[in-house]
Image (spheres, rainbow, N blue to C red):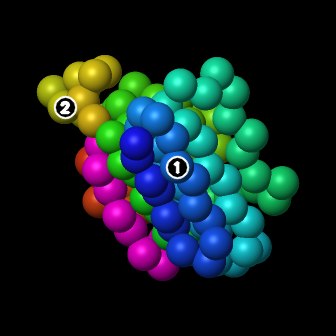
Amino acid sequence: MATCNAGNGCTITCPGGCGCIYVHDTKECTCWCEDARTFGGFRTPIDMNSRVSMKFSSLTLEKAAKIFEKILPGQVGLPISKFDPKKKLVVQVTNKKMENALKDAGFWTK
């Protein structure tokens, strides 16, 4: 079992990997399990300046990349040298700009 807790009650436990993002600016939370086919996103659009806390636990890089593409279309990438679709991410970021949080997780931003 994997548990992800991004703070402020933004938490989930899943049989496989998981992820949670809490947006401090809007007090919105979204969490997902590795095996989920869909991702709900946020009611209020977020951008690279949004302050977030994130927790990923045993979430594949491929799943994380798909989620970031959905919430920030065309703004997030990953150096091909680092791309391994089966690599498991373990990331904990607390109250940082989304841009910095993504860089901490190994992604690049526009």
| Mark carried by residue 82 | 2
> Viewed as shown, does residue 89 lie left or right of 70?
left
Q: Position of residue 56 (x, y in %)?
A: 40, 51
> Viewed as shown, does residue 104 lie left or right of 23?
left
Q: Main secondary structure of the magenta part?
A: strand
Q: Residue at x 35, y 32 (%)?
A: 61
Q: Position of residue 22 (x, y in %)?
A: 60, 66
- Choose top left, top right, bottom left or bottom right for residue 88: top left
> Viewed as shown, does residue 74 lie left or right of 105?
right
Circle 1: residue type: Thr
> Gap in Å between the C-alphas at discs 1 and 2?
27 Å
Circle 2: residue type: Lys
Magenta-drawn stretch contains 96: yes
Q: Position of residue 69 (x, y in %)?
A: 56, 34
- Choose top left, top right, bottom left or bottom right for residue 33: top right
Magenta-drawn stretch contains 75: no
| Mark carried by residue 13 | 1
Q: Secondary structure at mark 1?
A: strand
Task: Name above or below for residue 70 compared with residue 5.
Answer: above
Q: Residue at x 48, y 78 (%)?
A: 95
Q: Residue at x 33, y 40 (%)?
A: 58
In the rendered structure, which segment of residues is drawn in magenta?
89-100
Depth check: 17 or 74 in front? 17
